[in-house]
Image: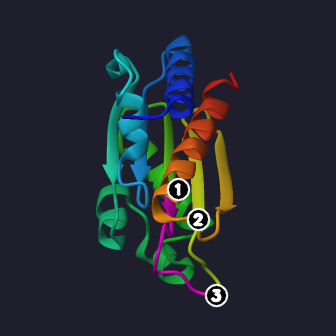
Amino acid sequence: MIDAQICDLAERVLAACRARKWMVATAESCTGGLVAGALTEIAGSSDVVDRGFVTYSNAAKTELLGVPQATLAAHGAVSRETAQAMATGALARAPVHLTVAITGIAGPGGGSAGKPVGLVHFAAAAKDGGLLHREKRYGEIGRAQVRHASVIEALNLLLELAAAG
């Protein structure tokens, strides 16, 4: 079950995509499919949602989305470069017009001084050339809260690109 804020955002994303006859794919790491789940919670979403890639491991990011191993080695899984490669990789591998990618450290462990718990990178890519990136530092607010906030941010990015036309 999704909360009212996420439900409203998901409905708005679906409506904006329907208006443009756009299909969507998600590429998720730290959210583990929650963005795809939020979109598909809405009845009738199959006319917009094509697929979701859950690429939790680096190997999955490379195998399923084509994220270059060199990008992962140079910047890490939680980086602007990886988020953008995930979004553009999903766009290249699915018959869609719009993608969103999320990679981060939800916690409670896994953080470092340079990449603390609560750091999440987002990217959204559109066939028409649009590419957005956001970096959020939610802090140590709890794993569920980081993931919840990340779903909201991802849906906002989708809406921003879908409504831009």
SS at mark 3? loop
Closer to us: 100 or 7: 7
Q: 28 or 69: which is nearer to us? A: 28
The residue pinned by badge 2 equals 141
- Tell me the quadrant of the picture where the N terminus can be found: top left
Tell me the mark number nearer the camera, choosing from 3 and 1: 1
* Above or below, comparing residue 158 to residue 74 in the picture: above
Indicate the secondary structure of the residue bearing disc 1: helix
Q: Distance between the residues labelled 3 and 1?
A: 21 Å
Q: Mark 1 points at which residue?
A: 145
Provide the residue span drawn in magenta. Answer: 103-112
Which residue carries the number 3 mark?
Answer: 113
Give coordinates of residue 50: x percent, y percent.
Answer: 33, 31
Q: Which residue is drawn at 56% across and 57% down?
A: 84
Local packing at callout 2 (Cα closer than 10 Å; few below 14, some 14-19, many 20+) is few
**From the viewer's perspective, is residue 148 above or below residue 68?**
above
Q: Does the magenta stretch include residue 105?
A: yes
